[in-house]
Image (tube, rainbow, N blue to C red):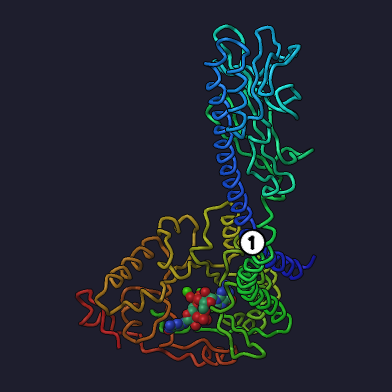
Amino acid sequence: MKRRTRKAVILVVCTMVLAALPVAGSLYYTHEQALDASQKHLDDVAARAALRVRTVLLTVEAALADSVFPARDGCNEALIRRFRDRTFSVPTVQGLGYVTDDGRLACTSYGIVDPPRPVRLEPTIRPDGSIVRFLPPAETAFAPGPTIIALHRLRDGNWLGAAFAPESLTNGFDPASLGEHGYIRVVLAGVPVATIGVPHPSAPDFLDARADVGVYQAEVLVGTGRAWALAPWRRNALVTAGVGAAAGLALAFGAAHLGRKRLSLSAELSEGLENREFEVWYQPIIDLQQDRCRGAEALIRWRHPERDLVPPDLFITLAEESGVIIPMTRWLMREVGRQMGPLLATDPSLHIGVNLAPAHVANLDIVEDARRIANEFGIRPHQILFELTERGLIDKPECREVIEALSRLGSELAIDDFGTGYSSLAYIEKFKLDYLKIDKVFVAAIGHDVPLAKLTQVVIDMAKSLGLKTIAEGVETEAQARYLRDQGVDYAQGYVFSRPLVADDFRVFVRSDRDFGLAGAVAQQHLADGAAPEVA
Ligand code: C2E
Ligand code: CA
Ligand code: CA
C-alpha cells in the first residue's frame, strides 16, 4: 500500500473509532444504568414479597395457636367450632384439623373425619426448631385444592394442622410486571412451595434477588430475564446512540478536519517536491575576524502555487514527521551542488551549511547522498557543513556511526541552535563536532542587562575551550557584530550582513567581496570592562 493511501486508511479508521467511542460509551453507560435500575426493582419486589409471606405465615401460626387450648381434649365440638371460627375469620386459612400422632386426620372445620384419614407427615419441611412444621402443597382432606399444611405439635404428641393456599403467599404480586420470564418463588426451609411466573427455561436468570422472610427459614426469590431488564434501555438506545453519535461526530469532524489538513499538507509536500516548487535560499556567513563572506547557510523555501513563499517553519516539522524530509534534503543538496558547485570549486574556503533533521542521523543514506553530490558537482566534502540540532544528537550507536562517517568523508559538522536545548557542552563534546552555532536568543541578549547576556559569554568561552569554531546566528546590529568579533567568535550570520538570498544574488554577494567594517578597532573603550555594547 502506498504511504499516502495507508495514511488515509488510518485516518478514516481513526475517525470512525473516534465517532464510535462516544456512542459506545453512552450506550454502555445507559446499559449499566438500566441493569442497575432493574436490580433495584427486583430487590424491592423481593423485600415486599418477603413481608407478605411473613404476614401469611404468622397469621397461620396465630390461628393454630388459638386452637391449642380447645385441642387439649382431642377432637370434640368445642375444637371443631374453634376450627370453623378461625377458618371463617382468618381469610388465609382454608381449613384447620386435628392430626393424631400416628398421622391420621381425626377432625376438621367440617366436622369429624370418620374413619380418620391418613395424612402424610413426611415429607415434611424440616422444622426450624419451632413447634410448627410444614407440608408442601398437595391435595389434602383439610380443604379443597392443593394446599400447604402448617402443623403445630401439641404437648401430647398429636398435631394441629392449618391448610392455606400457596397463592396466598404471593397474592398481590404480578410476575408480568417483571417481564416474560419474571417470577417470584417462595421457599420454606429450602423447599419451593409457591411460584408465580415463568422462570427462564434455559438460560440462567439474568437478574435475581433474594429476601429472607425472617421466620421458618423462609425466603423469597425473584428473577427475570435480560430482555425485561434492558427493555427501557433498548427503547432509549436510539436516542442515546443519537446523542452519542452527535458528540462523536463533532469530535471526529474536528479530528478529521485537522488530520485531513495535515494529510493533505504532507501529500502536498511530496507533490511540491516532484513539481519542483521548492527553492534554496542562501544566507551569507561572515568571517568576523577576516571581515569576509565565507559561505552561506542553505535555507529551504516553498514557492507554493496558491500561497506566497512558505517559510520552512511551517512545513519542516511535518516533513520530518512524514519522512518527506529525507528526499527533500537530498533534493536540496543536489540543488546546492547544481547552483553553488562552480562557485565552491573556484574558492575552496567557501562552505555551505545544510540543515539535517534528526531523522537523517538514524541511517547512513545521508553519507552516501553527500558523497555522490560532492563527486557529481566537484565540491570538496569539507565545503559542506552539516548543521544538527541537539535533538539530532542522540547518544545511540547509529547516530555516532552517521556522524563519524560524515567526518570521515571530510564534511564538517555544527551543532545548531546551541543553548536552546538541554544538552551540556560535555555531552556535545562526545560527538566530535567542528562548529557551534550560538542561537539568536543569545545574540539578541547582547547589550542588555539580562542574565542571558552573561551566559552568551560563557557559551563562547566554553566553545573555545572545546576547540569548536563558533558561528553566531541572528546578528542584527553592528554593535552585536563587533562585540562578537571582540569576544573571538569566528563567524556570524544575520540581517545586519544580509537576509537569505536567492542563488544568483548570493553569487553576486560573494563576488562583490565587500567588507563589513569589522576590521580593526578591536575592544572598543566601552567594552573594556566586559560590558556589552548598547544595541542600536
Ligand atoms: P535555522 O537553521 O536556525 O536557520 C536560521 C533562521 O534564522 C532562518 O530562518 C533565517 O532566515 C533566520 N535568520 C537569519 N538571520 C536572522 C536575523 O538576523 N534575525 C532573525 N530574527 N532571524 C534570522 P528560516 O529560513 O525561516 O529557517 C527557519 C528554520 O527552518 C531554520 O532555522 C531551520 O531549523 C529550518 N530549516 C530551514 N531550511 C531547512 C532545511 O533545508 N532542512 C531542515 N532540516 N531544516 C531547515
Ligand atoms: Ca541552521
Ligand atoms: Ca539555527
Can residue 354 be seen here? no
What amino acid is found at the position of numbered circle 1 in the picture?
A: Leu
Along the line of sight, which residue is nearer the eye, 19 or 360?
19
- Left or right? Give the position of 107 relative to 488: right
Q: Where is residue 244 in the image (x, y as percent from the top left)?
A: 63, 66
Residue 515: name its quadrant. bottom left
Q: Residue at x 21, y 77 (%)?
A: 528
| Quadrant (top left/top right/bottom left/bottom right) for the C terminus | bottom left
Residue 171, image quadrant: top right
Quadrant of res 266: bottom right
Vertical comparison of 528 with 117: above or below? below
Q: Position of residue 115 (x, y in %)?
A: 76, 11
Q: Residue tagged by mark 1?
A: 21
Looking at the picture, tell me which residue is in the foreground, 504 or 91.
91
Asked if residue 505 is positioned above or below residue 200 in the image, the reply reads: below
Nearer the observer, 132 or 65? 65
